[in-house]
Image: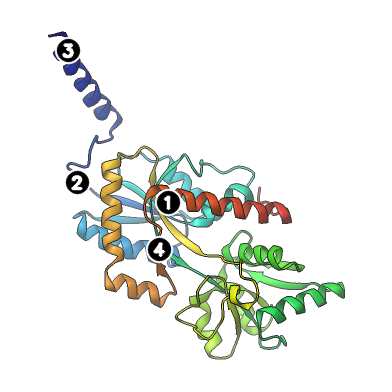
Amino acid sequence: MNIQRSLHLATALIVNVALWSGVPASAEGYPNRLIKLVVPFGAGGPTDIVARAIADKLSVSLKQPILVENRAGVGGNIGAEVIAKAVPDGYTLGLVLDSTLTANPSLYKKVPFDPDGSFRPISIVSATGMMLVVHPSVPIDSVRNFVAYAKAAAGRNEPITYASGGTGTPGHLTMERFRLHAGFEAVHVPYRGNAPMVVDLVAGQVKMGFVTTAGMMEHVQAGRLKGLGVSRITRSPLAPEVPTVAESGYPDFRVDAYNVLLAPAGIPEPIAALIEREVQIALKDPSIIERFRAMDMTISDVLGADNVRARLRADRAEWAKVITAFGMRLD
């Protein structure tokens, strides 16, 4: 009788904790209302486009509407904080750019979340690369020549300047990582967004930079810019004639920009597993594959929360080396 009574009390305690916390103890009955997907960047950007494509598929498979909420600012920190502090019940998810979790902890004096402890990774959704481009007026046509050109300019005490969409953006981080890798000096010219930077790059007001491959193809194919190399380990299907930086003499160099689907830490594992399963099904949909391909994005092969955590930790360590080496800080 005492054992039976203890079991009843334990069961009641578990039920009461679940009721008071508002967190379901299993995936049964989930979801039964609207789900919010937080994107820490503005509407219309690559991460937002990926989020809306995934939201469309999940809203059908989960049979509930999914609202994409853009919470842009501070390199993704604002949106990430919203995700981290949400109730971990499966009704608030987030899609973040990897740099928010890998570079920002070193870039900023303090971030409003624990990159390891505040989130339960669901899946890396998609990955893309950056292309090193130069204006046609620059007399170089390869990555090796680019590095030689940069070193010669530094030797004349006239280091090259390069542009990016802003301090801490993928274009800025990728060039700084390449500088550390190849050993040349350069001066960063940050813009307030990629759009005005690309306008000036095409006009020749600035001469070079790493820019998302998909956004460069029209200009490279039209001869308005020269594509020298892509940062990923494989060539872009959109520009198969442009070699990778790795095959251009820097075999250890690789930079991917990837989107990570997250939930707040503490989400019940059955719910996290359900979402992860549905995301993997969505990523096999031919329409998603083609839509991502047109944006020079590939479906990630990094599966499972532990593998995603391991990838994020490894990349965080690599970015910390770059950021520390060049004293890059945003406070």
Amino acid bearing label 2:
Asn
Q: Nearer the viewer, residue 243 or 116?
A: 243
Distance Cα–Cα, label 2 vs label 3: 36 Å
Amino acid bearing label 1:
Asn
Distance Cα–Cα, label 4 vs label 1: 12 Å
Q: Splitting the image into 4 quarters, where does residue 261 fall? A: bottom left
Sequence-first tag of 4 and 1: 4
Q: Splitting the image into 4 quarters, where does residue 51 fall? A: bottom left
Sequence-first tag of 1 and 3: 3
Q: Residues within 10 Å of mark 4 (few under 14, many from 20)?
A: some
Mark number, residue 229: none
In contact (CB < 8 Å): disc 4 and disc 3: no
Does dot 1 land on a helix, a strand or a loop?
helix
- Please determine whether, in this image, residue 179 is positioned above or below residue 138: above
Mark number, residue 32: 2
- Please determine whether, in this image, residue 6 is positioned above or below residue 76: above
Q: Is residue 99 visible?
A: yes
- Please determine whether, in this image, residue 6 is positioned above or below residue 190: above
Sequence-first tag of 4 and 3: 3
Q: Residue at x 16, y 8 (%)?
A: 2
Q: Is residue 219 left or right of residue 2?
A: right
Residue ID for mark 1: 307
The furthest residue to the left? 1
In contact (CB < 8 Å): disc 2 and disc 1: no
Sequence-first tag of 4 and 2: 2
Q: Residue at x 44, y 74 (%)?
A: 296
Residue ID for mark 3: 3
Amino acid bearing label 4:
Ser
Q: Nearer the viewer, residue 25 or 64?
A: 25
**Mark whose residue sits in front, 2 or 3:** 3
Q: Splitting the image into 4 quarters, where does residue 152 fall? A: bottom right
- Residue 191 in percent (x, y) is at 63, 67
